[in-house]
Amino acid sequence: MTATPKSTVGLVSAAALLAASALPAAAEKWDMPMAYAASNFHSENGAEFAACVTEGTGGDIEIVTHPGGALFGGAEIKRAVQTGQVQIGERLLSAHANEDPLFGVDSIPFLATSFDDSVKLWSAAEGAIEEALAEQNLVLLYSVPWPPQGMYFNKEVTSVEDMKGLKFRAYNAATAKLAELTGMLPVQIEAAEVSQAFATGVAESMVSSGATGYDRKLWENVSHFYEVDAWLPRNAVMVNKDAWDGLSDETKAVFASCAETAETAGLEKAKAYTTFTLEGLAENGMSVEKPSDRLKADLAEIGEAMTAEWLESAGDKGKAIVDAYKAM
Ligand code: PCA
């Protein structure tokens, strides 16, 4: 085929465009793996943070987010940042409580069960967590909570007795422990694989937010969501310390300012997404209810056992955080 003048013009202008867009090329591109759905508020907030840094540094650092576990699955993200495979990433901190119990402070059942309390607990814990992360070659930038955690089942559940024997999807040590104490069978599965796990019967129950149930269309396989408000786990955005140390003071200040904005904006997004997604579950046919008094009492008892266990494992530092939080 011979090229028509029109297509030649098209080619020329495309090349010109490419050259033009390449002009203010970023000096450095930072990939930012994220584990959750692109439409989830954490991911949208992360994309805004990335744009803030890219803009604020005049393109010197261009952050490119990769949501949905596309670059690294949730379970790999923290290590990828620590080892410098990527410079920055977002991870559910409590999934690493096996490395340091302090990372699990946000998943102590019924300690902080509202957004306001989650902010207080975080302010009591942030310094110690920052230090623990620094020991792992990580710089903490910002953290945003998930909505309160409820329980998903494919039947009506009014007591812990009703849970016995169910296959339970866990996302951290606390959720696995909860399964164990309620007689369920835990299996660790990342949020990105949750739809498939429920569709294939690998999981029949989980503790999570309305947000993750909504993101993963759980109504296709699950009928009930109970708003037990067990805790509000947090995602943390972290930078590899060597990459961080290589930044100018001016660039670090841009990161800090964008991180502060992201922490505030993310919290507001989390609140709005809570209502939106609980309504979404109901609109799609799920029963969204408060737990029965019996179920509440059963879970409170389990919560006490888990709290005692956490305090024991987290030692003086853990106790200091919980005491400071309770005094607020
Ligand atoms: N969603 C994530 C963590 C907490 C939440 O609400 C998940 O289920 O993996």
Image (spheres, helix red, strand yellow):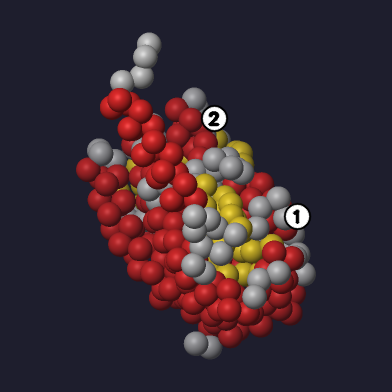
* Residue 311 visible to an observer of this rendering: no
Circle 1 sits in a helix, a strand or a loop, which is it? loop
In the displayed image of the protein, which residue is found farthest to the bottom?
Answer: 327
The answer to whether residue 76 is seen in the rendering is: yes
Q: Residue at x 53, y 55 (%)?
A: 25
Q: Is residue 178 left or right of residue 316?
A: left
Residue at position x 58%, y 85% from top?
Answer: 324
Query: Which disc number belongs to residue 202?
Result: 2
For the point 45% across and 66% down, the residue is 55
Structural crowding at the residue carrying mark 2, measured as other residues with C-alpha within 10 Å and reported as few (<14), some (14–19) or many (≥20): some
Say what amino acid the circle numbered 2 marks.
Val
Determine if the C-beta at disc 2 is less than 8 A from ligand 1.
no
Q: As rendered, which of 37 and 163 lies closer to the eye?
A: 37
Q: Quadrant of residue 316?
A: bottom right
**Residue 114 horizontal/vertical position (percent):** 41, 70
Task: Identify whether 56 is placed above or below 180.
Answer: below
Question: Element at badge 2?
Answer: loop
Q: Quadrant of the N terminus?
A: top left
Q: Position of residue 137 (x, y in %)?
A: 75, 65
**Disc 1 marks which residue?**
83
